[in-house]
Amino acid sequence: MVNVHKLKQDICEIGRRIYNKGFAAANDGNITVRVSENEVLCTPTMHSKGFLTPEDICTIDMTGKQTAGRKKRSSEALLHLEIYKQRADVKSVVHCHPPHATAFAIAREPIPQCVLPEVEVFLGDVPITKYETPGGQAFADTILPFVDRTNVIILANHGTVSFGENVERAYWWTEILDAYCRMLLLAKSLGKVNYFTEDKERELLDLKAKWGFEDPRNTEAYKDCDICANDIFRDSWESSGVQRGAFEAPPVMRPGGSVSSNGSSSNGSSPAPAPSGSAPALGADQEALVKLITERVLAALRS
């Protein structure tokens, strides 16, 4: 039988961890645990996650209707319920605002891959949703393109949501992600980020499969993908406003390493190096900028 009181205690413990890590200021964040086909435990709205008691946790059904509890349920419960509807294996969902990962959410900067072994094994490619006002079904639906291929999602201009077979595991993915984002920002401040070689990344993907962690890159559907270039969720970037800015793309790591005629790899990552002694081709925007600068320099010389 399900020990509901113990699950409520577990929710409160994770709430304290979230608050103590600085992942949830004031009343930020929400946590749920699914206890039956139609029952979900949920944290209350307008309460700090660092000071919850089991008596504060309410119960809702799979439509979002509150069925028990003295305090009103979280206003973002529909996001959690949508994840449960899409993933029968998920028993807990954690949403919060970890600052380093949320910085990537605000910048809409894709999370670089092939940098840290633990991240490759436990997380893989981390998607960023399109932005939607929190609380409603439209907000909940932003996770739909991604929820079947990952256990952690960055919510554009908002925070993160992670999920798993219990509340501690659901929280782990957020903690790993935020620690990684912090490391990336620190490495960037030192000057550069180094990527794994292809053979070392494939060793990690082999280990991941051996240890029982799923990754789309280990499936037939993605056998030809660039394993380090965020290929799993790249098709969502344009609609979500995601693009590389702070971090360079990794070297091409795919069967054949094909490069298109416009100088970019066929997956959209970094272009191949120009032949020795030749100048790299300029894009239309770069050419326009060079032309503008040249005209202004010549005008200044004539004045």
Image (cartoon, grey):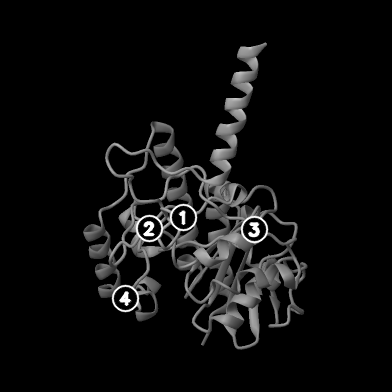
Residue occupying the point 44% across, 65% down:
231
Q: Three-letter amino acid code at disc 2?
A: Val
Residue contact at pointers 1 and 2, CB within 8 angstroms: yes
| Mark 2 or mark 4, earlier in chain | 2
Q: CA distance from mark 2 to mark 4?
A: 15 Å
Q: Nearer the viewer, residue 183 or 128?
A: 128
Q: Three-letter amino acid code at disc 4?
A: Gly
Mark seen at residue 212: 4
Q: CA distance from mark 4 to mark 1?
A: 20 Å
Residue position marked by numbered label 3 in the rendering: 29
Q: Which element is circle 3 on? A: loop
Q: CA distance from mark 3 to mark 2?
A: 23 Å
Residue 293 position within the rendered picture, expressed as x and y whole percent measured from the top left: 59, 27
Q: CA distance from mark 1 to mark 2?
A: 7 Å
Q: Which element is circle 1 on? A: helix
Q: Which element is circle 4 on? A: loop
Residue 49 position within the rendered picture, expressed as x and y whole percent measured from the top left: 63, 56
Viewed as shown, does residue 273 lie left or right of 40?
Answer: left
| Mark 3 or mark 1, earlier in chain | 3
Instruction: Classify 10 Å Cα crowding around label 3: few (below 14), some (14-19), many (20 and above).
Output: many
Instruction: Classify 10 Å Cα crowding around label 1: few (below 14), some (14-19), many (20 and above).
Output: many
Residue 3 position within the rendered picture, expressed as x and y whole percent measured from the top left: 54, 80
Residue position marked by numbered label 1 in the rendering: 177
Q: Which element is circle 2 on? A: helix
Location of residue 75 with respect to 288 vertically, above or below = below
Residue occupying the point 57% across, 55% down:
242
Mark seen at residue 4: none
Instruction: Classify 10 Å Cα crowding around label 4: few (below 14), some (14-19), many (20 and above).
Output: few
Mark seen at residue 119: 2
Q: CA distance from mark 4 to mark 3?
A: 30 Å
Location of residue 248 with respect to 84 vertically, above or below = above
